[in-house]
Amino acid sequence: MRTLIRSSLLAILIALPMLTQAQTTARYTLIEQFTGTWCPWCPYGADSIDAILGYIPNVRALAYHQGNDPMVTNDGNTVISHLLVNSYPSAAIDRLLINTPSGYAIAISRTYWGNIAAQRNQSASPLSISVAGTYHQDTREVSATVTLNILQQMTGEFYLNVVLTEDNLNYTQKKNVNGSVVNISPYYHKRVVREMITGPYGITLTPTGFSANQTVTETVNFTVPANYDIDECKLTVFLTTKVTLTVGGNPRPTQMNIQQAWQEPILTAFAVIPVELISFSATQQADAVRVHWRTATENNNRGWFVERRTVEGEWNDIAFVDGYGTTSTQQQYEFIDRDVRMMETYDYRLRQVDFDGTVDHSPVYRVMTAPTPLETRLLPNYPNPFNPATFITVELAQESDMTVMVYDMLGRAVRTLATGVHPAGGHVFEWDGTDSQGNAMPSGIYFTRMVTPTHTATQQMQLSK
């Protein structure tokens, strides 16, 4: 590898925090690899990174692709130029200026990566980084709140960098095998920098520094492109400080030393908020049909079209019910369809619509309407076994006082679902697997018991988690 800057010409002016104070934390070292599918030696560099991640704790890595490469990015090329990269494969270790036998360089050959990373890991950091937030399945939006806990005074210009990477991208890779260059396919590239969310240089947090025991928070929002595999995406966050290199009295391009890093898979680090439909039913009540549904969470939910059709007929919208937008708490919905005929079969479904126009459909629920029941009875619950909820149907031949309760196997009352006078017709009650105080019940066998002045009936059901 060619020398980047000769040591005899170099004076380094560095604004780095002193690490001699007692209050520090473990350092997470970042290796930034510079590579390309066209580079026959680069697969060996990727293997070296794999090995380092395996035996040195607290090391994280990124891979910038350059040149005629399908994974190249403009911001990545800016970083490569900024860090004076001139050979491949090479890598920067926390963007430090390293004195090698060939001279000082930021991007160094793989011969030195392991030793430099190990040495860097032995030094503590004056801050810690934590990241929390949400990932919305429908919009693919990530909202990440970065918290910096500053443990000691730090002076200088500091920048926050947020980078999105993706693993296992399959592109043909050249490789030198015993002196011959061959094409390797399939070849799965790791740690590929896909988006530099805060740009190639990061965003400025402070031009002067931080005080001891200061807490700094910054929220970054971005959308993961649809062609990225979210299961393979990681978020990397790191803090840099400006360092000026002067050669022969003339300032050279500035670089940013990395003070601390954080990296986790998006689906591991962030709460995933979908529009999650956890129950949906349509049941006859007297001379109408009650459509009822519940959600566990919602994201960007404009609302619900209630659709109905007769057997083999066309779907028609019969109602629209507003959604709750974005929420992580359970919500319940209901629509009463009074425009039905007896002795007819109807199918019902929901068409959920986001504010951005995205559409999703629920399963279909079939209802066969009938006149007022000829007898009072308790029907088997549905579904059974169930998790997290089940529906219990009671048919009353006439208006009657009625109690419907859930018991456990020891005969202890768990939940009262209905009490008081109810009109003739069908009545549907939902049990969500909780007791009267809202506590979740364990898996097992339970019993529904219906009592009226003239009838008593019991049905067995199974909660299976």
Image (cartoon, rainbow, N blue to C red):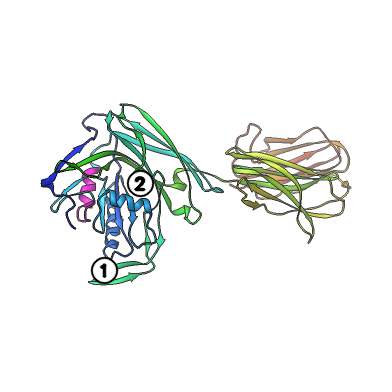
Query: In terms of depth relative to the viewer, which is nearer, 65 or 372?
Result: 65
Label 1 SS: strand
Residue bearing the label numbered 1: 176
- Residue 313 placement (x, y as % from top left): 79, 60
User: For the residue carrying disc 1, how many other residues have a C-alpha within 10 Å: few (<14), some (14-19), or many (20+)?
Assistant: some
- Residue 77 placement (x, y as % from top left): 33, 53
Residue bearing the label numbered 2: 200
Which amino acid lies under the numbered mark 2 shown in the image of this protein? Pro
Which amino acid lies under the numbered mark 1 shown in the image of this protein? Asn
Q: Residue furthest front?
A: 250
Q: Is 97 rendered above or below residue 41?
A: above
- Residue 130 placement (x, y as % from top left): 39, 37
- Residue 276 placement (x, y as % from top left): 60, 46
Q: Is 31 rendered above or below residue 183?
A: above
Q: Nearer the viewer, mark 1 or mark 2?
A: 2
Q: Is residue 119 magenta?
A: yes
Lateral position of residue 47 relative to residue 354, left or right = left
Quarter occupied by residue 302? top right
Label 2 SS: loop
Residue shown at 31% from the left, 29% from the top: 210
Residue shown at 21% from the left, 31% from the top: 20
